[in-house]
Amino acid sequence: MSSRLARILTTVFILAVVLLPIYWLVSTSLKSNREITQEGTLYPHVPTLDNYIRLFTEKQFGSYLTNSLVVTFFSVAIALIVGAMGAYAIARFRLPFAAERKVGLFLLTLRIIPPVVILIPVYLLMLSLGLLDSWLGLIATYTAFNVTFCVWMVESFFREIPVDLEEAAMVDGDSRFGAFRRITLPLAAPGLAATAIFAVLVTFNEFLFALALTATPRAMTMPRGTATLIGRIDTDWASMAAAGVIGALPIVFFALLVQRHLVRGLTMGAVK
């Protein structure tokens, strides 16, 4: 009985820790700034949707959200395509001095480098290419970062797929690329989904490069646009909370869409 009570209390505590910030965010988004800053209520006494309406009518949040969705989709899609081909080459072909065993670690090391270290070189590169304050500049930057992560992560999934399946397809007349496209990729779909959701989370929430490379609503992403709600004198807390709720919805929908593949991808190869 005591162990069951302990499990129940632990579960309740974990749920409270996880759900309380979400409740507070949604609750704050339904309050007025006066109720947030002066009254400090635990729940909205007079719920209002004005904060959400103002985001799209006065704050140009629709542009910020559209920019985030477009940039995230293309950068992750390109990174997955390029990363999958690079990971397949590392997993299937042997390089001199067994370099294929070190390439993944080397790419991961590049990804671990703090972004602020290369912020200025990336800014100057985009300036020279005329890609500042544009979708293309952000897509190129995020794709470069995501490719290294995708290669490192997808490689492990490709190694779990038996080579015999591809060889059997090639014996039947298929090409190497055809076997890769028709055999390997479908079997690695759970791993690709797991990689995609991590890449989407990182890209959609990225702020530093969006801050440096964009300056107008034409290219500002959702995190960058939300930062404009912080003024020199005061902060529009209610609108920021509403922006947080809206900004979280695409990630939630994407996670629900690929959750089946995500669970399979995270456990792929764990049971032999």
Image (tube, rainbow, N blue to C red):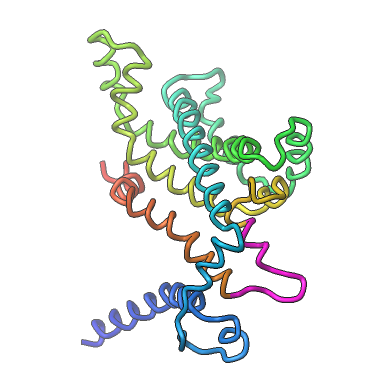
- Main secondary structure along the magenta-highlighted residues: loop
Q: Where in the figure is residue 260, as x and y percent of width and height?
A: 28, 49
**Where on the picture, by quarter, is residue 192?**
top left
Depth check, front residue: 157 or 76: 76
**Where on the picture, by quarter, is residue 181?**
top left
Depth check, front residue: 67 or 96: 67
Name the image quarter holding the C terminus.
top left
Residue 221 appears anywhere in the view = yes
Q: Where in the figure is residue 270, as x and y percent of width and height?
A: 31, 46
For the point 49% across and 26% down, which residue is it? 86
Magenta region: 224-237
Name, please, the residue furthest toward the front: 57
For the point 54% across and 61% down, which residue is it? 56
Assess whether residue 232 is covered by the magenta stretch.
yes
Q: Is residue 73 left or right of residue 12?
A: right
| Position of 129 relative to 254 (above/below) | above
Residue 203 appears anywhere in the view = no
Q: Where in the figure is residue 194, as x and y percent of width and height?
A: 39, 45
For the point 33% across and 11% down, which residue is it? 175
Depth check, front residue: 254 or 106: 254
| Position of 35 relative to 234 (above/below) | below
Name the image quarter holding the N terminus.
bottom left
Depth check, front residue: 108 or 101: 108
Name, please, the residue furthest toward the left: 1
| Position of 12 relative to 65 (above/below) | below
Assess whether residue 148 is covered by the magenta stretch.
no
| Position of 244 relative to 69 (above/below) | below
